[in-house]
Image: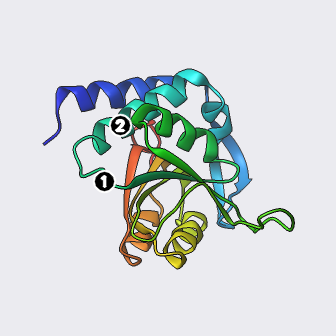
Amino acid sequence: MVTTEEISLKNELIRLLKDVNCVKFGDFTLASGKQSKYYVDIKKATTNPKVLKAAAKLVNYYVSKENNENLKIAGVELGSVSIATAVSLETEKDLLIIRKKAKEYGTKNKIEGELNPGDNVIVMEDVTTTGGSVSKAVDEIRAVSGNVKKIYVIVDRQEGAKENLAQNNVELIPLVTIEELGLNK
């Protein structure tokens, strides 16, 4: 059941995303390789403290209704680290940073932060199209016995990510869909 608090938090995030003018029009190639007539310039949003705070509050609203035992908040470098950090601060849950490739020096870790076998992990993502990029992070976490059941994304382009991730037993929870930003999918 949708509550007035959820609606209020979501509407605030939508307003802020529109205020930072993060949707651009033209001819773009997306990370998925797809061509698009619009681009969600999410870095304009995720470098804005008001947007980060609004997103973190909405995720905290959802997370607070669940079992939070051994919960970690993960973000994939570079795009999702600021989001995951904001959510970690809001929820007071430990932060994990998932590297795209392991460091070649020091600890050579691919996952930064303390992740123990059996820990529950929520992965944060900035934008999803097909879900391919974030799916790799899920695989990395699961490879070291972390449990990933949910991914929260600031903007879902509604082009298959939800369905693709469901095949990997992960629920994609968009904070905002591209339709809610006023575009047709």
From the viewer's perspective, is residue 68 above or below residue 108? above
Q: Is 129 situated left or right of 26 in this image?
A: left
- What residue is rendered at 44% in x and 73% in y? 164
What amino acid is found at the position of numbered circle 2 in the picture? Asn
Q: Which of the two residues, 115 or 12, is positioned nearer the viewer here?
A: 115
Task: Establish if 142 lies above or below 10.
Answer: below
Residue 162 vs 26, above or below: the answer is: below
Residue farthest toward the right in the current orientation of the protein:
105
Q: Residue 117: give x, y in percent of width and height.
A: 45, 71
Q: Quadrant of residue 21?
A: top right
Q: Position of residue 116 (x, y in %)?
A: 48, 65
Query: Which residue sits at x=49%, y=46%?
Result: 94
Mark 1 or 2, nearer chain start: 2
Residue linked to disc 2: 60
In the rendered view of the protein, which quadrant contains the N terminus?
Answer: top left
Residue 28 is left or right of residue 67, and the answer is right
Element at label 1: loop
How many numbered discs sit on the rendered protein? 2
1 or 2: mark nearer the eye = 1
Q: Position of residue 34 (x, y in %)?
A: 65, 65
Which residue occupies 58% across, 23% down? 49
**Identity of the residue drawn at 59% across and 71% down:** 136
The residue singled out by tag 1 in the image is: 69
For the residues labelled 1 and 2, say whether their Cβ atoms are less than 8 Å apart. Answer: no
**Residue 84 at what x, y percent from top left?**
54, 44
